Image: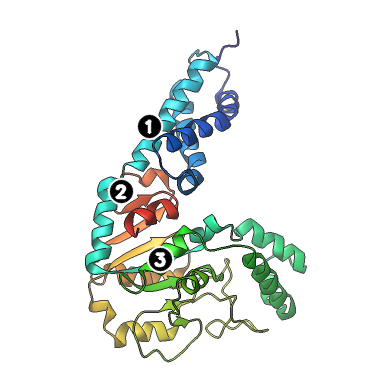
């Protein structure tokens, strides 16, 4: 019978990879068994397997195990981690309390629209090649191709539909979610609002702002763009840039004394790599200090009190549903 021997890290890694599909299926069956929604949690299962695999590579190298025992080992470790993710009960309770009592500002990034099949970074590279440029720097220098890029992105988004995350935030605005900062070009959250019969004030360019509670689109908007690409004037901010924040938003924070209010801050599906946006987040989070939750799939942050680990549909259904 085949034995797992000390043949090196790479050989053990290959053996583990053979178990990926059966272990993920094992976790999916567990999710169904406990009557959780498999669609809302399944995007993180490969991450769970990867973490269990890393643990196995560290602890099993040099040991002799029969394949069936090794499969059981990685199944058990994957399931233990999955259960820990599903049981973030106290964090969910605290986050929901903050939203209900203090209200919340949400900052949402590209990962937020993943569930809807919105184009991700690799898809953007496909669009770049389709319009005949090699990168975003070249795209910015060719306005006709830049306009074509936006039209192609718009076409892809029109094939997608709002997901549970979009619907939950739209349903909670403006009663509990008082401001939405959306860094995505897509209009999925706008369509979620429309389906609910809501029409929130959207700010997608430098404007005079004379009321509270808005959907802010700093980085571009497929519902309104033109053949130039001027940031702050319906232009799009591309992934290789340092982000952009409207001057009218900064004025809004000051004029309405929002920085002196107590609210909770939620950051969903955003990598926090845009310098200008990060400055705004830092101000909202720390001046003065406010409860700030980050929602994502970085498994090493599972035990952080203010990190809610999981796909956004899974998390938001617990804190907004």
Within the image, what quadrant is residue 154 found in? bottom right
Q: What residue is rendered at 25% in x and 52% in y? A: 93
Percent position (x, y) of residue 233?
Answer: 55, 86
Query: Sequence-wise, which precedes: disc 3 or disc 1?
Result: 1
Provide the residue designation for mark 1.
Answer: 80
Q: Is residue 121 above or below residue 46?
A: below
Query: Sequence-wise, which precedes: disc 1 or disc 2?
Result: 1
Q: In what element is the residue under mark 3?
A: helix
Q: Could you tell me how far apart the alpha carbons at marks 3 and 1 are, in whole angstroms? A: 30 Å
Q: Could you tell me how far apart the alpha carbons at marks 3 and 2 are, in whole angstroms? A: 24 Å
Percent position (x, y) of residue 94?
Answer: 24, 55
Q: Is residue 272 visible?
A: no
Report the number of numbered marks. Answer: 3
Q: What residue is rendered at 29% in x and 85% in y? A: 256
Query: Sequence-wise, which precedes: disc 3 or disc 2?
Result: 3
Could you say which is closer to the camera, residue 241 or residue 292? 292
Q: What residue is rendered at 61% in x and 59% in y? A: 121
Residue, far top: 1
Provide the residue designation for mark 2.
Answer: 304
Could you say which is closer to the camera, residue 316 or residue 246? 316
Q: What residue is rendered at 45% in x and 22% in y? A: 73
Within the image, what quadrant is residue 18 found in? top right
Tags 3 and 1 touching, CB below 8 Å: no
Percent position (x, y) of residue 165?
Answer: 45, 60
Q: Is residue 194 visible?
A: yes
Provide the residue designation for mark 3.
Answer: 169
Task: Select label 3 or label 2 by which is in front.
Answer: 3
- In this image, 146 relative to 161: left or right? right
Image quadrant containing the C terminus: bottom left
Q: In what element is the residue under mark 1?
A: helix
């Amino acid at each position: 019978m085949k034995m797992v021997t000390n043949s090196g890290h790479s050989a053990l890694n290959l053996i583990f990879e053979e178990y990926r599909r059966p272990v993920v299926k094992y976790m999916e069956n567990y999710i169904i068994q406990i009557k959780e929604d498999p669609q809302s949690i399944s995007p993180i299962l490969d991450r769970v397997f990867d973490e269990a695999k890393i643990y196995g590579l560290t602890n099993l190298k040099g040991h002799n195990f029969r394949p069936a025992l090794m499969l059981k080992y990685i199944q058990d470790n994957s399931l233990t981690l999955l259960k820990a993710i599903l049981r973030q009960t106290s964090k969910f309770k605290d986050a929901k309390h903050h939203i209900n009592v203090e209200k919340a500002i949400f900052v949402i990034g590209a990962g937020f629209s993943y569930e809807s099949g919105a184009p991700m970074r690799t898809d953007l590279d496909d669009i770049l090649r389709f319009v005949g440029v090699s990168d975003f720097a070249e795209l910015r220098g060719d306005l006709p191709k830049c306009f074509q890029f936006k039209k192609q992105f718009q076409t892809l988004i029109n094939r997608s539909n709002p997901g549970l995350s979009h619907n939950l935030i739209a349903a909670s605005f403006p009663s509990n979610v008082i401001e939405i900062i959306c860094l995505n070009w897509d209009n999925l959250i706008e369509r979620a609002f429309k389906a609910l019969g809501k029409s929130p004030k959207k700010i997608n360019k430098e404007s005079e702002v004379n009321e509270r509670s808005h959907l802010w689109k700093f980085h571009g908007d497929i519902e309104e763009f033109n053949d130039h690409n001027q940031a702050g004037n319906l232009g799009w901010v591309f992934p290789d840039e340092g982000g952009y924040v409207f001057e009218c938003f900064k004025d809004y924070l000051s004029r309405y004394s929002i920085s002196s209010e107590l609210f909770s801050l939620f950051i969903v599906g955003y990598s926090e790599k845009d310098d200008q946006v990060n400055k705004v987040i830092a101000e909202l989070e720390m001046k003065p200090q406010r409860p700030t939750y980050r929602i994502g799939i970085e498994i090493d942050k599972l035990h952080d009190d203010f990190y809610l680990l999981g796909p956004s549909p899974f998390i938001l259904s617990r804190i907004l549903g």
